[in-house]
Image (cartoon, rainbow, N blue to C red):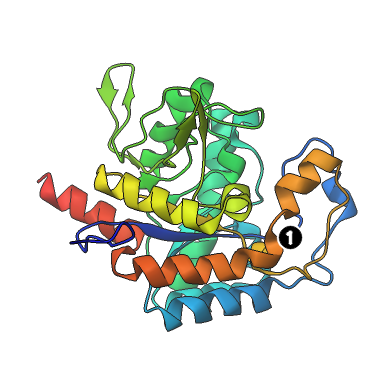
Amino acid sequence: MKSKSSVEHNDVNFLTFDVEEWYAVNYKSVNLSLYNDSGTHLEKNMDKLLEICAENKIKSTCFIVGDIARNKPNIIKKIHSEGHEVASHSYNHKMINKMTPDQFRLDLHKSCDILEQIIGEQIIGYRAPSWSVNQEILPWFYNILNEREIKYSSSVFPGKTFLYGIKNFPQEIHQPLIDGVKQPVWEIPQVLFSVIGKKYGFSGGFYLRALPLFFVKKLIVKKNRKGKNIFVYLHPREIDPKSPKLKLPLIEKLIHYYGVKGCEFKLRSILKNFQPTFIRMGDYINQLNQSEK
């Protein structure tokens, strides 16, 4: 008999990192001109994350801000040389829903160009900063990704919060229907859980840091059994209690920093429990595209 925490080896999940500086936020209360990468721990924190991956024999997908690639190309070279997938996380972490289509197109090309120059391979994955894909930009978002030959996005929070999200967006990996037309680009959305009709994340960022570890593990098992693919997502600063700090109002401070001290332990425990299930997002999407031919 299987225990409640046992893992089916045919389950597929993803480990993802958003590779950005400690001050890369989109809160209205933050004046980003006051901050720079002085005192950054980014390289040290990425080394720690890659070490954790190596210990667990897991390959991650790293969504990298283009400006990081320009200023710290050695980080990207190391990520790639250790077998992790390099994908785009925009050029300078600006909200897509604040851009025009032309501005987004330029930002996307700029970020992919510099990443491709460094690793010598095509970039096929994209994640929007701060889950900033909303209903209004869907008509052009996937078209522009397809122009660049991006094969998948992992940008949608399929529920509505005061910060982001799209209500009633599917939680399965799928090719979205826009105006009745199936898009060639796949979306890998977050998988959420519901409490009294309200949807919440659980597998990354604040949600992972705030929720009890046993509860997160049970949700991963439950969602996998229902055929859902979970992605864990973290930022390098989230495993580093000594990272430089932003000056934030109370609510945003809680969202940004609560639970950082225990986050590395949670990550290690989840990877140990679910190690056989983690693969790179790009590999899975390539398998899906091959199966449809």
Farthest residue in the top direction?
Answer: 179
Number of other residues with Cα within 10 Å of mark 1, as a class: few under 14, some 14 to 19, many 20 or more: many
Q: Quadrant of residue 273?
A: bottom left
Residue at figure coordinates x 12%, y 44% from the top left: 292
Q: Can the viewer see residue 59? A: no
Q: Can the viewer see residue 258? A: yes
Q: Residue 47 or 150: which is nearer the viewer? A: 47
Up/down of 28 relative to 9, above or below: above
In-image side of 148 versus 136 (left or right): left
Residue 169 locus on image (x, y percent): 41, 27
Q: Which residue position holds label 1?
A: 22
Q: How many labels does the image show?
A: 1
Residue 248 locus on image (x, y percent): 85, 46
- Report the quarter where the N terminus lies: bottom left
Residue at figure coordinates x 49%, y 22% from the top left: 135
Residue at figure coordinates x 74%, y 54% from the top left: 257
Up/down of 262 relative to 291, above or below: below
In-image side of 51 versus 243 (left or right): left
Q: Quadrant of residue 275?
A: bottom left
Q: What residue type is labelled 1?
A: Trp
Residue 178 locus on image (x, y percent): 34, 22
